[in-house]
Amino acid sequence: MFIILPTHSQLQFESYTVHGGDVDSAAVNELVLDGQQRLRSLWKALAGEDDNRFYIQVESVRSRNLSVVSVQSHSASRGIGKKYVEPHLAYEANLIPAAILG
């Protein structure tokens, strides 16, 4: 099992090219995380650390159909993620903040 971390700005981890790969590090937009990075990512998701907030999208919060549709990450300071800082607005969008699981 692998965890893929989308990157949108400065890399938060030291990264290495996959064996046989020839990629300019400035063009990297996804990282494959190893064990230590998986634990750090899990902690960041549950603690709501940094600007990113993680949400679990379910079928329907209102009807308690909690079948998982996706896991999403949104910036808490810009865009639609700014709106979801308020838990009731996240719930209306069928998003459960991962931070409440920690």
Image (cartoon, grey):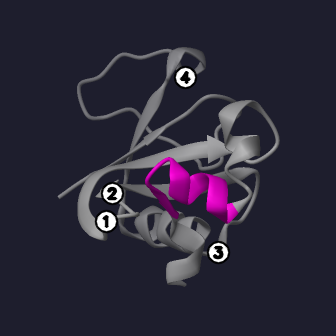
Instruction: Give the class, few, some or many, for how many residues have Cα within 10 Å of label 3's Cα (few <14, many ≥20).
Output: some
Q: Residue at x 36, y 68 (%)?
A: 35
Q: Name the residue carrying label 2.
A: 60
Q: Earlier in the sequence, mark 2 or mark 3?
A: 3
Viewer-proximal residue among 30 and 83: 83
Residue 8 among those drawn in magenta: no
Location of residue 57 in the rendering, given as x and y in whole percent from the top left corner: 38, 53
Viewer-proximal residue among 33 and 51: 51
When the figure is inspected, residue 57 is found, relative to residue 8, above or below; the finding is below
Query: What is the C-alpha distance between the residues marked 3 and 4?
Result: 28 Å
Residue 25: give its label: 4
Relative placement, left or right, of 2 versus 34 is: left
Q: Secondary structure at mark 4?
A: helix
Q: Given contact means CB atoms under 8 Å apart, are the residues at marks 1 and 2 in contact?
A: yes
Assign the magenta stretch its main secondary structure: helix
Q: Name the residue carrying label 3.
A: 47
Q: Name the residue carrying label 1.
A: 63
Query: What is the C-alpha distance between the residues marked 1 and 2?
Result: 6 Å
Relative placement, left or right, of 37 versus 85 is: left
Query: What is the C-alpha distance between the residues marked 1 and 3?
Result: 27 Å
Three-letter code, disc 2: Ser
Residue 92 among those drawn in magenta: yes
